[in-house]
Amino acid sequence: MKIDGTRRQDRAIELVLAYYAAFNRGDREAMLALLADDVVHDLNQGARETGKEAFAAFMRRMDASYREQLHDIVVMATQDGDRAAAEYVVHGEYLRDDEGLPPARGQKYVLPGGAFFDIRDDRIARVSNYYNLQDWIAQVGG
């Protein structure tokens, strides 16, 4: 199939891939530009946060404690382009203690993960992230 950007499904896939490309570049402003103002962010095994400012604050917390790159990203979307899902492998380094988690000593980890997206008006309206926290804790020596 040729992805030419004229189909809603194609645009949804391109949107999610652009989001992850910005993540991997460390370009948080580009990530935020792809989000709806009232974006809903479901943290893995955590709370639901709403709004771009909450999302930006979450990214600042993450950037302080972790350095991550996503590899082997696969994105799928519904035909109408309203929902998408992604699977990836996180390659990371735990830089600074994160509250409630084991101490950081620069431990490296490789962790499969996934996310679900709602898309509205060519923006990401929801991101729900999932990964195996117990696997991560075991990898960093917790």
Image: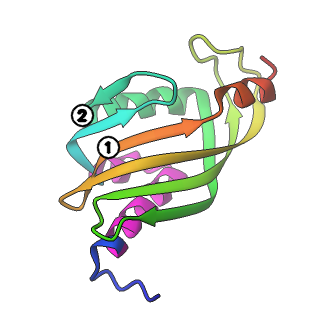
Helix, strand or loop: magenta stretch: helix
Which amino acid does the dot numbered 1 rest on? Arg
Question: Does 11 lie within the magenta span?
Answer: yes
- Secondary structure state at the residue bearing disc 1: strand
Quadrant in which the C terminus is drawn: top right
Residue type of the residue flagged with mark 2 = Gly
Q: Tell me, for residue 126, which label it has, or none.
A: 1
Residue drawn at x 70%, y 25% as measured from the top left: 134
- List x then y, in percent, for residue 57: 36, 28
Is 29 a magenta residue? yes
Placement of 89 over or under 50, stated as above or below? below
Secondary structure at badge 2 equals loop
Image height check: is 102 above or below 48? Answer: above
**Marked residue nearer the N-terminal end (1 or 2):** 2
Q: How is the image coloured?
A: rainbow
Is 45 placed left or right of 93 in the picture? Answer: left
In the rendered image, residue 70, in percent from the top left (x then y), is placed at: 61, 52
Q: Are marks 1 and 2 in contact (CB under 8 Å)?
A: no
Q: How crowded is mark 2: few (under 14 residues within 10 Å), some or many (20 or more)?
A: some
Q: Name the residue under label 2.
A: 51
- Measuring from the top left, give residue 40's x and y in whole percent: 29, 36
Q: In the rendered picture of this protein, how many numbered marks are placed on residues? A: 2
* Residue under the point 18% across and 59% down: 121
**Residues shaded magenta:** 10-33
Instruction: Farthest residue to the front: give it.
Output: 79
Residue furthest to the top in view is 100
Q: Quadrant of residue 101?
A: top right
Q: How crowded is mark 1: few (under 14 residues within 10 Å), some or many (20 or more)?
A: many
Asked if residue 132 lies left or right of residue 127, the reply is right
